Image (tube, rainbow, N blue to C red):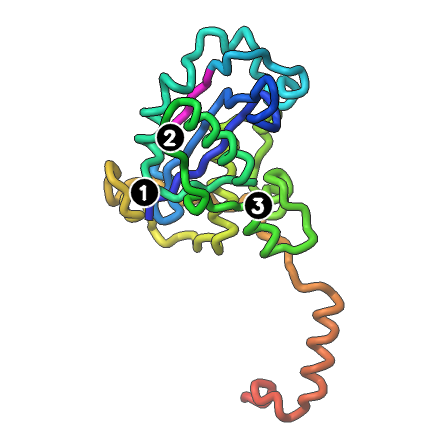
């Protein structure tokens, strides 16, 4: 199954303000069966407007840096060719989809269907109700190294989100000998050297002390009915 993990950086929060906020960076990572193939899409875009100070503090992308970058309408065909009809894995998908569809509309292209987006923020909130669900918080939960993320960046955030998405999908046992070729992606060689990165530390236990105590009390109540205790 081909999926695209995607992130954008923008000049602000709403593409329909006046003046309109625009996309300034797109980063995307190709997955096959949750495994990165090594294929990526990365593009800086001239937004044809100024960069507000607040947005600059978030991602560090300046007006001067973007001044010679292409316009969205000049890169839209390459972008659409990369994503094709694959599901788009996005953290807080409604934000990025709103911007992408605004840009596609202004460029005279068909809009992306909302059903094409897979929202990892919604998945995280469903799996861990009440817990923080930002990308940084999920990196802490799954012990994923995000030390390079000093500012937001579309490609780096997509690469990190790909690891988070793997964990949200149940993770992958180590040592299965899987390669990018085994994942079924085109343009990869079976028997290659890619392996999922091992966690630097084991995941913390999720069973609370209260749950352990309750379990021990329940087992004690079973007495001889706990047959495994009577094994020779």
Position in image of residue 97 (x %, y %): 49, 36
- Dot 3 corresponds to which residue? 121
In the picture of the structure, the residue carrying the numbered disc 2 is 40
Q: Are marks 3 and 1 in contact (CB under 8 Å)?
A: no
Question: Closer to the camera, 11 or 114?
Answer: 114
Report the residue at 40% width, 47% height from top. 34
Q: How crowded is mark 1: few (under 14 residues within 10 Å), some or many (20 or more)?
A: many
The residue shown at (36%, 28%) is: 109
Return the x and y of residue 13 as percentages of the image width and height.
61, 28
On-image quarter of the C terminus: bottom right
Closer to the chain start, of discs 3 and 2, is 2
Q: Where residue 185 sits: x, y (%)? A: 28, 42
N-terminal of the pair, mark 3 or mark 1, is 3
Query: Where 175 falls versus 189 (above or below)?
Result: below
Q: Give the range drawn in magenta.
A: 39-45
Tell me residue 162's x, y (percent).
47, 41
Q: Give the numbered dot on residue 180.
A: 1
Mark 3 or 1: the one toward you: 3
As measured in the structure, the alpha-carbon distance from the residue carrying label 3 to the one carrying label 2 is 22 Å
User: Looking at the rendering, which quadrant does residue 149 occupy?
Assistant: top right
């Amino acid at each position: 199954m081909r999926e695209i993990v995607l992130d954008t950086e923008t000049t602000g929060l709403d593409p329909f303000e006046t003046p309109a906020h625009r996309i300034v960076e797109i980063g995307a990572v190709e997955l096959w069966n949750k495994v990165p193939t090594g294929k990526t899409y990365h593009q800086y875009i001239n937004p044809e407007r100024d960069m507000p100070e607040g947005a600059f503090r978030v991602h560090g992308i300046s007006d001067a840096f973007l001044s010679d970058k292409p316009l969205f309408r000049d890169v839209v065909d390459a972008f659409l060719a990369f994503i094709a009809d694959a599901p788009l894995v996005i953290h807080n998908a409604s934000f990025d989809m709103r911007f992408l569809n605004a840009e596609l509309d202004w460029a005279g292209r068909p809009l992306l269907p909302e059903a094409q987006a897979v929202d990892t923020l919604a998945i995280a909130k469903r799996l861990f109700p009440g817990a923080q669900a930002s990308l940084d918080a999920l990196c802490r939960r799954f012990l994923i190294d995000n030390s390079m993320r000093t500012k937001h960046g579309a490609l780096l955030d997509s690469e990190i989100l790909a690891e988070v998405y793997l964990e949200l999908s149940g993770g992958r046992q180590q040592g299965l000998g899987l390669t990018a070729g085994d994942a079924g992606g085109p343009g990869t060689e079976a028997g290659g050297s890619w392996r999922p990165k091992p966690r630097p530390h084991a995941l913390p236990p999720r069973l609370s002390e209260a749950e352990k105590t309750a379990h021990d009390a329940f087992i004690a109540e079973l007495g001889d009915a706990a047959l495994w205790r009577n094994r020779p």
